Amino acid sequence: MRKVSIFVDVQNIYYTTKHQFNSNFDYNKFWKLVTHQREVVAAFAYTTDRGDTKQIQFQNILRAIGFEVKLKPFIRRADGSSKGDWDVGITIDIMEYASKSDIIVLASGDGDFDVLINRIRALYNNETEIYGVSNLTANSLKNTTPNFFPISHELLLRSN
């Protein structure tokens, strides 16, 4: 079996699926899709910690699926803006696991990751798969791999 490492930029996926579809990403379906007939080396979900009950429940669901949840404190600035960016942490982890994996899966639309994806492909010849909301994913990121998979209704939770 081929070895896969999975990295999910939870904030990016949350906001882009909400904006585009007014729906939530289905992490169970995603997990089944990207792990099918593959050995999981690592699986990380990067998010912020606001400490509220709903968020803690969501983090526990991610853990039950198989993700290691990495938390960063949610910081609200005096000007009303917020901070909770995981780009550097995701980059470090992908660089660490690229040499141990045949396939790197990144769920994010953030164009800052294009250089990283190009670098690991050059260094380790990894197969890469990018999942993102198509019109909210940077073209530079989409173009780094032949395996860009647009998030669509199949990977969303159904509304009741």
Image (tube, rainbow, N blue to C red):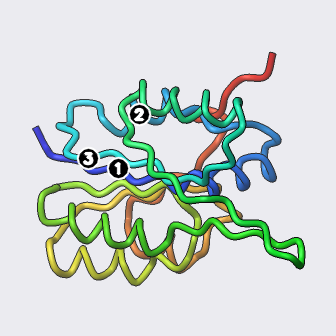
Give the residue type that dot 3 points to: Ala
3D distance between C-alphas at marks 1 and 3: 6 Å
Give the crowd class for mark 1: few <14, some 14-19, many >=20 residues within 10 Å: many
Q: Label 3 belongs to which residue?
A: 42
Give the crowd class for mark 2: few <14, some 14-19, many >=20 residues within 10 Å: some
Q: Label 1 belongs to which residue?
A: 6
Give the residue type that dot 1 points to: Ile
Residue depicted at x 44% and y 75%: 88
Asked if marks 2 and 1 touch (Cβ < 8 Å), the reply is yes
**Left or right, 51 with reference to 7:** right
Q: Position of residue 17 (x, y in %)?
A: 71, 48
Residue depicted at x 57% and y 51%: 10
Give the image quarter of residue 90: bottom left
Residue with the most extreme top position: 160
Q: Label 2 belongs to which residue?
A: 31
Q: Position of residue 140 (x, y in %)?
A: 53, 80
Q: Nearer the viewer, mark 3 or mark 2?
A: 3
